[in-house]
Image (tube, rainbow, N blue to C red):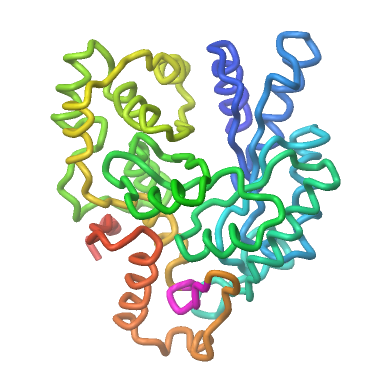
Amino acid sequence: TQTEEVEKAVEAALEEGYRLFDTAFNYNNEEAIGCTLKRWVDAGRCRREELFITTKLPHIGNRASDVEKYLTTSLRRLQLDSVDLYLIHVPFGFIPDKNSENPAKEADGSYVLDNTDLLAVWKAMEQQVDLGHARNIGVSNFNIAQLEKVAAAARIYPATLQVELHAYLQQPELRACCAKLGIPLTAYSPLGSPGAKLHFQEKYNFHYVGNTEPDLLEHPLVKEIASSHEKSPSQVLLRHLVQQGIIVIPKSASPKRIKENSQDEVDINSCCMSLIFAVHYCVCYNIEFFSRLGFIMSICLHQWEGDLNKKSPNENQGPMMNLKMKLKVFLTILKKSIGNTPTRLPIFVDKTGT
């Protein structure tokens, strides 16, 4: 089962010395992680103070009045009194479905957007630190404007910005912004989401086409550098980020890969670092996820402001809205989010090729 798989992965990670665990309300694995960590602490195999637990406010909870409710639920699932880091998962919000933990849907299948006041949400996040429910707070998937607005208004400064970041998507503008603001950057999908193609094929019956770049782990240059250092491609890619002062949170359920990812004792010379920098194609793999689950059709008309994300007057036109216009607006949003580098989006088709 998924619970057993998560527990085995956490056990393997703990055995290898991992002490930071990143989860979220939406990942549906908080309970399994919490049970495993509690067993270790109760058995004296590690102390709570040695662990660093991160979880996230869901997109259906991006309202100041709901922050404490969703964090309390996460704490109960994790069997913790507090988390070490609580993040705003995304900078936009959806109206929750009355009968589930998913967003409500419009008649055309798109999700029902909510007005999202990021500054009000951030103040509610700060209150959770005051109450002792979270030791640090931060943000995830924010663009430059949103990050700057929150940082300027914050009483408690963001502890980190967590975004998709890997050799194919190096986020130079966003990284420069974080350096200027003094906000540490955390890279999720640091290996380029190698399981994305298989996941979408198996779960949603979609087949990946469009981009001709190989999986990042199979890139000839990455493999050559790994071979010259007698390391694996994943170890080289992780070290490439770590040497830049970026926090990495690789995901794996394989004990072998979990062990491999922890063994990154390799110093990549400046020449090899420059070669990996040149791999940058600006491929954003997580757009696949948002697109296929209907998020893109929902947010493409959303006015992404730095302090207030609100629905536009035309947002309720639903299927009447021309698809080309939606795509044009979405690409504008994407450009704001990850900088001015031309973006090559992955494309999925079903088995019929439509």
Query: Front-most of 159 and 231?
Result: 159
Which of 71 and 210 lies nearest the eye of the viewer?
71
Residue 27: in magenta span: no
- Left or right, 345 with respect to 132, comes to left
Please determine whether, in this image, residue 250 is positioned above or below residue 164: above
Query: Which quadrant of the figure has residue 202?
Result: top left
Q: Which segment did they paint magenta?
A: 298-305
Q: Position of residue 281 (x, y in %)?
A: 21, 49
**Residue occupying image coordinates x 45% and y 79%:** 301
Residue 8 lies in what quarter of the image? top right
In the rendered image, residue 303 lying in the magenta stretch gets the answer: yes
Residue 293 appears at what percent x and percent y? 46, 60
State the quadrant of the C terminus.
Answer: bottom left
- Give me the residue at 56% from left, 13% from top: 17
In the depicted view, which residue is nearer to us: 347 or 17?
Answer: 17
Above or below — where is 195 with respect to 118? above
In the rendered image, is residue 310 in sight? yes
Position of residue 131 in the picture relative to residue 310 (left or right): right
Q: Magenta segment, principal secondary structure?
A: loop
In the image, residue 77 above or below residue 150? above
Q: What's the residue at 83%, 47% (across, down)?
A: 130
User: Could you tell me which quadrant the N terminus lies in?
Assistant: top right
Can residue 352 be seen by looking at this rendering?
no
Residue 55: percent from left, percent from top:
65, 42
Residue 270: x percent and y percent? 21, 26
